[in-house]
Image: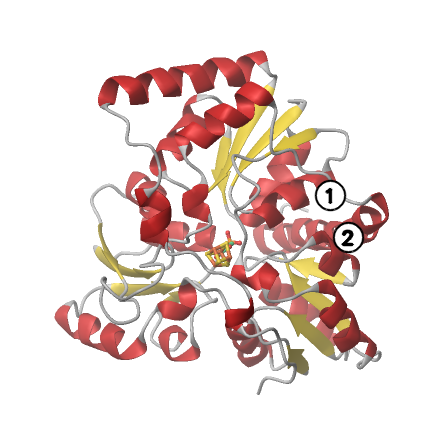
Amino acid sequence: MVTATALAEDRYFVPRTAAITAAQPVLDAAEHAALVARIKTLLKERDAVLVAHYYVDESLQRIAEETGGFISDSLEMARYGKEHPASTLVVAGVRFMGETAKILSPEKRVLMPTLEAECSLDLGCPADAFRAFCEAHPDHVVVVYSNTSVEVKALADYVVTSSIAVPLVEWLRDQGRKILWAPDRHLGDYIRRETGADMLLWDGACVVHDEFRSRELEKLRKDHPLAAVLVHPESPRDVILQADVVGSTSQLIAAVQNRPESEFIVATDNRIFYKMQQAAPDKRLIEAPTGGHSATCRSCAHCPWMAMNDLTSLAETLEHGSNEIFIDEDARLKALVATQRMLDFAAEHRRRVVGDA
Ligand code: 13P
Ligand code: SF4
């Protein structure tokens, strides 16, 4: 199935989520309130807006909500940052999200609470190795997941996020195009099964979703026979095959809100529960099981790099203007072409689906 050789996971360091959170300052209620107030003041003083991913800590998501910022999936984060009038975007998430904001809004200052927040998909797809893969298959159209560096995006014809990947690949398939896909092997496999497209896959994985376990999920479903199973497509095939809904973070939140079930088993980062519960307060959310038991899992359903975004690092970034994203202009312009194609396709697709053309 997999046709490219990616970096083995042991070639890059994957921190444990528990170790990241244990090293963060513990704040009492008064310190927490004072820090939140300081962040809110700094956002105003710096003409900054906070754009947060659903996987960051609830305390940051709350600040985004309370200050006119935004919480969303990676596609909407990119779009929102571009359209918002603030001169500084503070992106709470992982590095590729900050880079995407900069690709689309070069005139804005883009800051992140930390520049150490990586993504295993990005780390597992270095630009040089990926260039060789592309050069070996010149007759393929290159489609890369947004969870990649600006240099990898610069090699692509199209960038996609999980919310738009299937319709975009269907559209390419209908034109008879052969596709080279990177970096997530599970998402690539899912798209290939959904679309029947001719696809070569890079061999990357998300360390968080890769930990969801199908046998344990089968057992959990028996204990909750009326629950709907919601799965992010970065999860392994045997987990996806048990899903009632496969979708991006925002699509999974919409499913909780719109579906009739009162219980949901959720296979994605558990920080999404904040928004899910807000969207459907009466519904019960259950974490899908991860590798082994909580004592042995590495992420335990919370991304270690997303966990690096905390209140203290956010306040320091705003205070000092630190952790600014800079990207090479040549790479940015190339990456912009592939990213803009996604945004244009997404806008056109929405018009077709919603019928507001
Ligand atoms: P979404 O595009 O669904 O927000 O996912 C981003 C991500 O990193 C999932 O692990
Ligand atoms: Fe990357 Fe997975 Fe973390 Fe998303 S959850 S940022 S795909 S490592």
Q: Is residue 80 left or right of residue 231?
A: right
| Front residue (pair 99, 19) | 19
* C-alpha gap between disc 1 and disc 2: 7 Å
Q: In this view, does 228 lie to the left or right of 330?
A: left
Q: Earlier along the polypeptide chain: callout 1 or callout 2?
A: 1
- Residue 331 in percent (x, y) is at 81, 51
Q: Using the rendered view, name the quadrant where residue 195 is placed.
A: bottom right
Above/below status of 263 relative to 293: above
Furthest residue in direction bottom, as rendered: 1
Q: Is residue 110 left or right of residue 251?
A: right
The residue that label 1 is drawn on is 103
Q: Using the rendered view, name the quadrant where residue 115 is placed.
A: top right
The residue that label 2 is drawn on is 335
| Front residue (pair 238, 98) | 98
Q: Which residue is drawn at 42% across and 75% down?
A: 236
- Residue 223 in percent (x, y) is at 13, 70
Looking at the picture, the colour scheme in use is secondary structure
| Kind of residue at badge 2 | Ala
- Residue 338 in percent (x, y) is at 76, 56
| Quadrant of the snapshot with the N terminus | bottom right
Q: Decide: marks 1, 2 in contact (CB < 8 A)?
A: yes
| Kind of residue at badge 1 | Ile
Circle 1 crowding by C-alpha within 10 Å: few under 14, some 14–19, many from 20? many
Count of numbered badges drawn on the protein: 2
Q: Which residue is drawn at 80% across and 81% down?
A: 137
Q: Can I make out residue 263 in this image?
A: yes
Above/below status of 203 relative to 152: below
| Front residue (pair 151, 65) | 151
User: Please, what secondary structure does the residue beneath circle 1 have?
Assistant: helix
